[in-house]
Image (cartoon, grey):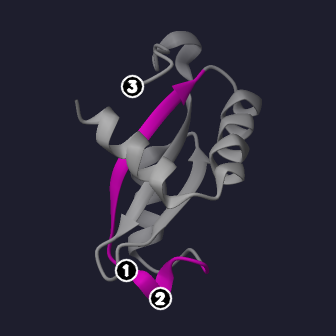
Amino acid sequence: MPFGVNPERNGMAYFVYIVQSEKDGTYYIGHTSNLSERLDRHNSGRSQYTKAKMPWRLVYQEAFDSKGAAMRREREIKAKKVREYIEHLVRTSRA
């Protein structure tokens, strides 16, 4: 996990995540305190924006100690508005 944060610290971690649609390859960026529950919401059609492009798979995650830090990082990634940047994050996280 980039920006190495211990997810067990204080019993709570927040995550920035990127999921990729297996239907058309598009990416969705979000933040959550529960990755497995959030991925389930994306894949069960309970997320309005992503339900049309199911199924989704988790391709990237970063952990943070606070919700605010996770939200700032999410905005930073989204502000890039460049697919190549997202793909770079995904590639380097698999290394």
| Image quadrant assignment for residue 1 | top left
Residue 66 coordinates in the image, percent (x, y): 69, 24
- Disc 2 marks a residue whose amino acid type is Ala
Query: Badge 1 local density, few (<14 within 10 Å), some, or many (20+)?
Result: some
Residue 43: image quadrant is: bottom left
Residue drawn at x 58%, y 12% is 10
Name the residue rendered at 66%, 34% in the picture.
70
Q: Residue at x 58, y 45 (%)?
A: 32
| Relative vertical location of residue 59 with respect to residue 54 in this rendering, above or below | above
Residue at image mark 1: 54
Mark sitting on residue 1: 3
Q: Pointers 1 and 2 in contact (CB under 8 A)?
A: yes
Q: Badge 3: how crowded within 10 Å, few (<14), some, or many (20+)?
A: some
Three-letter amino acid code of the residue under disc 3? Met
Mark 3 and mark 2 lie on one chain; the one further toward the N terminus is 3
Magenta segment: 48-64
Looking at the picture, tell me which residue is in the foreground, 47 or 52: 52
Mark 2 highlights which residue?
Answer: 52
